[in-house]
Image (cartoon, rainbow, N blue to C red):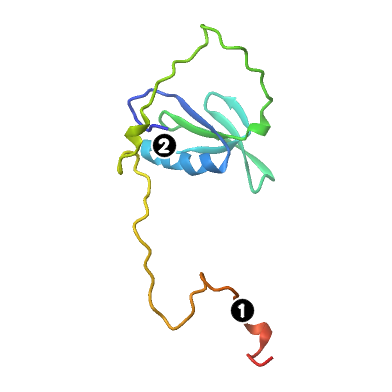
């Protein structure tokens, strides 16, 4: 997803998966807009219904921000639609992307591994331990 004000999109819609719930707030921050998540009904051009209180209540939200409106949609709340065969009238343009442009370090801005550092302590490293025994109040003391 390219976040740019140059494109005049009204809506950017994604599925309510963990992937898009991770990406959409970041894109919204770059675009300086507020996303609307888990939409289960579209009532108007800027009127959406979404669950709140763990799904026990529904909230109607009116989007009054600037374009684009970013949404995640719960796909199970909408009826499935048959997709007609592609014809020349509804064919979309496909842009070819050169994958070698993504190999550069700062091309996308993704994270990269730098190093692993740890402190020397007298305590054992629990990450490398074969067996970990925990205690606490239930054991009362170390005597068994």
Q: Nearer the viewer, residue 29 or 138?
A: 138
Classify 144 as above or below 127. below
Question: Residue at horizontal 35%, vertical 36%?
Answer: 102
Tag on residue 34? none
Q: CA distance from mark 2 to mark 1?
A: 47 Å
Quarter occupied by residue 115: bottom left
Question: Which residue position holds label 1?
Answer: 134
Label 2: how many Cα within 10 Å (few below 14, some 14–19, many 20+): some
- Who is closer to the viewer here, 71 or 95? 95
Query: In the image, is residue 44 above or below residue 58?
Result: above
Q: Residues within 10 Å of mark 1 (few under 14, many from 20)?
A: few
Q: Which residue is mark 2?
A: 33
State the image coordinates of residue 84 (x, y, percent, origin top left): 62, 13
| Outermost residue to the bottom | 143
Which residue shows up at 34% across the image and 33% down it? 100
Disc tally is 2
Where disc 2 sits, the SS reads loop
Examine the rendered structure and indicate whether residue 95 appears above or below residue 47. above
Drawn side of residue 29 relative to residue 41, left or right? left
- Image quadrant containing the C terminus: bottom right
Q: Nearer the viewer, mark 2 or mark 1?
A: 1
Counting from the top left corner in percent of width and height, residue 16 is at: 58, 38
Tell me which residue sits at (60%, 27%) in the image.
42
Q: Is residue 114 left or right of residue 22?
A: left
**Picture quarter with the N terminus:** top left
Q: Quadrant of residue 57?
A: top right
- Quick check: 87 above or below 118? above
Tell me which label, 2 or 1, sits earlier in the chain: 2
């Amino acid at each position: 997803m390219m976040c740019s004000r140059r494109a005049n999109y009204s809506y950017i819609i994604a599925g309510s998966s963990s992937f898009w719930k991770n990406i959409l707030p970041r894109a919204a921050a770059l675009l300086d807009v507020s996303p609307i998540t888990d939409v289960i009904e579209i009532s108007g051009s800027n009127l959406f219904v979404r669950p709140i209180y763990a799904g026990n209540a529904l909230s109607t939200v009116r989007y009054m921000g600037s374009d684009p409106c970013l949404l995640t949609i719960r796909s199970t709340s909408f009826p499935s639609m048959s997709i007609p065969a592609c014809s020349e009238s509804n064919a979309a343009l496909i842009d070819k992307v050169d994958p070698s442009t993504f190999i550069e370090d700062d091309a996308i801005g993704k994270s990269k591994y730098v190093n692993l550092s740890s402190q020397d302590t007298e305590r054992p490293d629990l990450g490398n331990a074969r067996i970990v025994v925990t205690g606490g109040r239930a054991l009362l003391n170390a005597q068994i």
